[in-house]
Image (spheres, coloured by chain):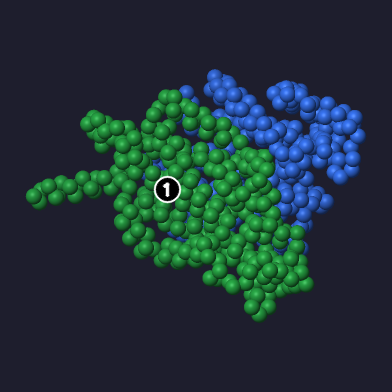
Amino acid sequence: MTQIAVAAEEVEIADLAEGRAPTTRELLISLLRKPAFDVCAVLLLLFFAMAAVPQIFTSVDPTVCDLGKSMHPASAGHPFGYDVQGCDYFSNVIYGARPSVLVSVVASFGMFLLAGVLGLLAGYFPGFVDALISRTADVLFALPGMVALIVILNAVPHRNIWIILGVILMIGWPGGMRLMRSTVFSVRNKEYVQAARAIGVPAWRILTRHVFPNAMAPLLAMTTLGVGGMVGLEAALTFLGVGLPPGTISWGSQFGIAASYREAPHLFVWPSIFISVMTISFMIIGDSIRDVLDPKLLK
Amino acid sequence: MLGYILRRIAAAIPIGLIVTFGVFALVFLMPGDPIRALAGDKPFPPTVMAAKRAQFHLDDPFFVQYLLMMRDTFTGHFGTTFAGADIGEQLKLRIPVTLRLALLSYFFEWLCGLLFGIYAGFRRNGIVDRLLLLATLLILAIPSLVSTFTAQYVFGVKLKWLPVSGILDGFPTSYLLPAMVIGVLGFAGLGRLTRTSVVETVNADFVKTARSKGLSEGRILWRHILPNALLPVITYLGLDLAGMFAGAIITESIFNLPGLGQFLFQSIQMKEGGVVVILTTLAFVSFIVINLLVDVLYGVVDPRVRA
């Protein structure tokens, strides 16, 4: 009895040394022990709440404007002052969280799934499937991503947030796919995969139950580190005029307007602070997740 | 080595065709009529319109347009934009702007990145190392749009140390601020990569062997540590260039530098399909060439790659 337990424990330790992905529970516990992670998680929850129900943060309607107050500085009840059209800037910045949160979270999650699945297929089925996926990735890699994004988004007549998300996903998957493919390569001939194959487990079950969970850690780390960048990307695209349509309340369009009105720096400062705090929180959370997933990277 | 280079070029050709064709198709599919947009609100005589359309082959089938376009690009007959500006002249004016900006930012990036990265890697967990990690985390986390605007506002508008925008002050004064912004943004990634790579190499077995053989520290540094530690950094060189061009679009727009990035952006908005394809082809070809050079350089530095 005890012998079996000891043997099981030894197997577990050997698994850990091999870089076995820790369980979700283990991950959460070690993450919550990091104070920086806790602070950033609280900040992000605030931003998520801002995106979901902005009404609880401000009672002012961001679209009620008074041109006479155009670009006025802060006053009582209006802590961020007024924008060019004389709308309350505080409520505009609060309402601007929605597109940024939506783009960063959905794009990152979608990217993880897309790159993960394609990398899984390319790594597990060498030959035609791998060639098809890898050559497509080569083509996409050959273009500077920003150029491709601008060209494609400009060709779309009625842009909305979902189209922007789709195009970002379409252009952005090759990096993650290559990472996933290389880790799948190292996993696909491990003993447990061979054992599963030998007892006749169907391929899709091997992929979902054995290969994917054991090969996803590097991609997960890469994705979480990239979430912050997505926020900046959405802002940059909207600033360049190929992102969200004019009139949408978003931090990117607020930058675009602030760029033409240098005499009123508050137009620029507030969205900058919000967007930076959000991306830094995402970065630190990504950093913590990476550290927890792979202790070898602690350098 | 020659066979390797030829293989790489052969592999690049089909990718190049797909990319240019794809870009051309996208520009072609964009909504709106470029010639009509040119006229604005004024009425346009149908004969002028037809002549303009014929001049730019706009009534030919899509595929013919693409072939004509590629012929013109590779024979150097770039033609004119829809508004009548000579594209060849424009390129002659704009390429030096982007090149100066890129070289100056490269200089800042590589100087800071290598110096700090190598130093921090050697003195791991020292004060410089900790500062570098904190600074690069901030630089990587803050969106480039925010840092670019902040730098322009603080150093250009408020302190008036450097010109706010334009290139009227010539080289290098007008280029310093945008180049420093791009350089510092790129430095974060490079510095971190260099540091990690140096840390890994310093602890490698062959360094211990070299030390136990009694080699001088200088010789260990120059002959054993640096050549090995800088291998991943060389790969970064190629990747970095793609980022540089993407950065140029935003930076040149913000600092109003009449370079290729700004040209590309304006052309997309004016539906100048020809110019967009020429510029993306240019970006693509230089990207391939740089990556090829990087791979060759890699082979020179690392004997294991040479086959």
Q: Which residue type does callout 1 highlight?
A: Leu
Left or right: where does residue B172 sit relative to residue B48? left
| Residue under pointer 1 | A220
Horizontally, residue B302 falls left or right of residue A216, namely right
Question: Relative to B176, does residue B26 appear above or below in the rendering?
Answer: above
Chain letter for the part of the structure drawn in green? A
Residue under the point 70% across and 63% down: B154
Residue B6 place in picture, x, y as percent: 58, 21
Compare residues B48 and A168 and report the one nearer the observer: B48
Report the side of B169 relative to A34 (left or right). right
Residue A94: image x %, image y %? 59, 66
Percent across and percent down for residue A173 are 51, 40
- Count of labels shown? 1
Frontmost residue, A88 versus B192? A88
Q: Is residue B118 visible?
A: no
The residue positioned 74% from the left and 71% from the top of the image is A66
Q: Residues within 10 Å of mark 1 (few under 14, many from 20)?
A: many
User: Which chain is home to disc 1?
Assistant: A
**Which chain comes out blue in the rendered image?**
B
Camera-side residue of B269 and B169: B269
Residue A181 location in percent, x, y?
42, 36
